[in-house]
Image: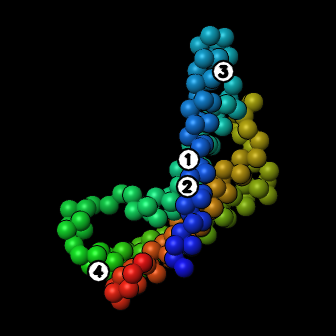
Amino acid sequence: MLKKLNLVNEWVGKSISWVSTLLVLLIFIEVIVRKLFSLDKIWVSELSWHLFAAMFLFSAGYTLRADQHVRVDVFYQNLTARKQAWINLIGSVLLLIPWCLIIIYTSFQYAMNSWLIGEKSPDPGGLPARYLIKFTITAGFLLLLYQAVILILQSLRTIRGKEN
C-alpha cells in the first residue's frame, strides 16, 4: 500500500523535472534576445523565477520520498535501519509536520489575499495573476506533508520489523 501512496510524489517529481528543460530553454532565449536585440521583457524574467520556484516547491515531496533531502549524515548513516526509522519518525512528528502545517496555513492565507485583490506584477509588462505562484507554496508543502505522513508510516513499519 505504501508503494502505491508513493506514486503521487513520484509522478509529480518526474513531471516537474521537465520544467528544468523548459527553464533552460527560456533563459537561453531570453539571453539571446537581450544581447542581440537589446530587448528586455520583464514577463520572461518573472516567468523564469516562477518556473524555478514551482520546480523547487513541487519537487520537495519527491526529494523526501527518494531520501535525497539535506541532512547531517555524520551519525545517521552508521545507524541501523530501525534507529534511522526512529529518527525519521521523531523528526517528522516534531519538526516536519508542524512546520508543513504552519507554512500551509500561512501561505494559503497569503495566496488567498493575493487572489482576492487580483494581484499582478508591479512591473510594467510583468505577469498577471501573481497569486498563482503564491498558491504553489501551499501546493508544494501539501505534497511535502503528504510524503511526511508516508515516511511516518514507513518508519513505524520498520520499527515494528515489517518490510516496507
Q: What is the distance, in whole Å, between disc 3 and disc 2 at their CAs?
A: 32 Å
- Asked if residue 53 shows in the view, the reply is no
What percent of the width, then of the height, locates residue 60? 50, 58
Q: What is the distance, in whole Å, between disc 1 and disc 4 at their CAs?
A: 32 Å
Of label 1 and label 4, which has the lower sequence position? 1
Q: Are marks 1 and 4 in contact (CB under 8 Å)?
A: no
- Asked if residue 96 shows in the view, the reply is yes
Q: Are marks 1 and 2 in contact (CB under 8 Å)?
A: yes
For disc 3, the marked residue is 40
Instruction: Tell me if residue 158 comes above or below residue 137 in the rendering.
Output: below
Of the pair 67 and 41, the residue shown nearer to us: 67
Query: Which amino acid, by three-letter code, is at mark 2?
Result: Gly
Query: Which amino acid, by three-letter code, is at mark 4?
Result: Arg
Q: What is the distance, in whole Å, between disc 2 and disc 4 at their CAs?
A: 27 Å
What percent of the width, then of the height, locates residue 153? 46, 81
The quarter of the picture where the N terminus appears is: bottom right
Left or right: 115 as drawn, with respect to 88: right
For disc 4, the marked residue is 82
Of label 3 and label 4, which has the lower sequence position? 3
Q: Secondary structure at mark 1?
A: helix
Quarter residue 32 falls in: top right
Residue at image point 59% right, 13% down: 35
Q: What is the distance, in whole Å, between disc 1 and disc 2 at their CAs?
A: 6 Å
Instruction: Tell me if residue 7 comes above or below residue 149 in the rendering.
Output: above
The tag on residue 150 is none
Query: Which amino acid, by three-letter code, is at mark 3?
Result: Asp
Q: Secondary structure at mark 2?
A: helix
